[in-house]
Amino acid sequence: MPDKVLVYSRFPRNELVRFGERYELLNAAGKRPTEMFSAAELGEIRAMITSGGTTLGGEAMDLLPKLGAIICYGTGYEGIDLAAAAKRGIAVGHSPGANASSVADIAVTLMLAATRRLPVADNYVRSGDWIAAKPSPMMRPQAGMRGRKVGVYGLGEIGRKIAARVAAFETEVGYFSRSRQDVPYQHFPSLEALADWCSVLMIAVRAGADTVHAVNADILRRLGNSGIVVNISRGSVIDQKALVAALTDGAIAGAGLDVFAKEPHAPDELTALPNVVLSPHIGGHTLESHVAMQDCVLANLEAFFAGKPLPYEVGAAERLPVPASEPVPRPQM
C-alpha cells in the first residue's frame, strides 16, 4: 500500500503526475486541509509537498500530528516557519540548485530586455510608429553591455551562473555575498559599495528577514541614472515603492522583474511604466527545471519513508526566520 502524502499548495496537475505514480496523494489544492479531508485522514499524514512561498506556520503543522517531513517543490522555503518545524522535529527539504540554470537564463533575458528596451521596441513596430517614422524618445540609443559593470547581489548557485553568463557579454563582474567566494570576480564588502560601482544590479540573494527591502531608495540612487536593476530573487528584497519612484523620476534607467512584493501582481503604477520589463515569476518554469525539482522531491520523500536523512534538507544554518510571502502561481503548461 503506497504511503500517503498531503499536497498542501496548489499545483498544476501535470506537476504532480510523477508523485502520484509513487504515493497516494491527498491534494488540498491550496485550501485549508481540514476543508478537504477529515481529521482521521489528516491524522495519518507523515509527509507533505508544498511550495516554498506558501505560508505554512505551526498552526497548520499541528493539524497533522504525525507530520515528519515538509518537502518544498523548488529551491525556496521562505514561507515555512522553520522554528515551528524544528520544535516539532519535522524535517524540511527543498530542491537546491535544481532550477538555477533556468533562473539565471531569465535574469540575463530581463537584463538584455531592460538595457535594450525590447518591449518598447516591440511596441514601436506593432503600433506602426516605425513605418510612420514617428519620433520616440524611448527609442534613442542606449548603452549596450560591452564595458558595463554588472554587480551580482548574492553568489549562491543562481548568482554564480548569472555571473558566468553576464561575463560573456564583455562586462566587468563584481559581487556582494555573505561570504567571499573563490571566483574570478571582484568582491565588494557591502551592498552599498557594489551599487556605487555597478550600473546593472542583479539580485540573486536568498530572501530572508535580513534582506527585506535591502535594495532601497539609497541603493537605487547609488546605481545612477543609467542604472538597471534586475530581480529574480523575491519581491521582498526590493522596496517596491522606492523602485517605482526611482523609475518615475529618472533616478535609474530601468528594471527587469520576475518577482513582486505581492503575487500575482495586478496592474498598477509599476506595470504602467515603459522602462520596466515584467514576467510572472517564471524563472524556474522550464521543462528541465521541473524534472530536476521533482527528482529532488522524490529523493527526499523516498529517504524520509525509508527512515533516512533527507538528501536535500534545509540546513541548520539556513533555519533563520524569513518573511512569509504570497503563494507563487505557476502558469499552466
Image (cartoon, rainbow, N blue to C red):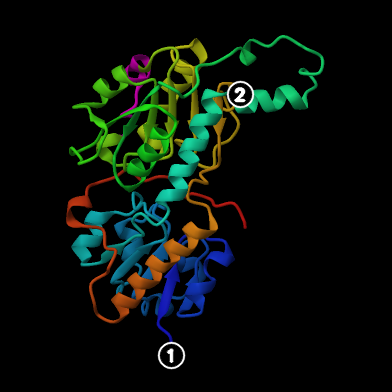
Percent position (x, y) of residue 74?
A: 41, 56
- Disc on the earlier residue, 1 or 2: 1
- Per the image, label 2 sits on a secondary structure element best described as loop
Tell me the tag on residue 147: none
Give the residue type at disc 1: Met
Q: CA distance from mark 1 to mark 2?
A: 54 Å
Q: Is residue 221 magenta?
A: yes
Q: Nearer the viewer, residue 188 or 308?
A: 188
Q: Determine the residue positioned at 36% across, 77% down.
A: 43
| Side of 78 relative to 142 (left or right) | left
Q: Residues within 10 Å of mark 2 (few under 14, many from 20)?
A: few
Q: Determine the residue positioned at 55% across, 30% down.
A: 113
Q: Determine the residue positioned at 33% across, 33% down.
A: 152
Q: Determine the residue positioned at 58% across, 23% down.
A: 117
Quarter containing the C terminus: bottom right
Percent position (x, y) of residue 283?
A: 49, 46
**Residue with the mark numbered 1:** 1
| Side of 332 relative to 1 (left or right) | right
Give the residue type at disc 2: Ala
Tell me the tag on residue 272: 2
Q: Residues within 10 Å of mark 1 (few under 14, many from 20)?
A: few
Percent position (x, y) of residue 210?
A: 24, 36
Of all residues, the one furthest to the bottom in this rendering is 1
The relative height of residue 317 versus residue 305 in the rendered view (above or below) is above
Would residue 121 be seen by someone viewing this image from the given angle? yes
Percent position (x, y) of residue 129?
A: 77, 17
Q: Is residue 292 magenta?
A: no
Q: Which residues are magenta?
A: 212-222
Quarter containing the N terminus: bottom left
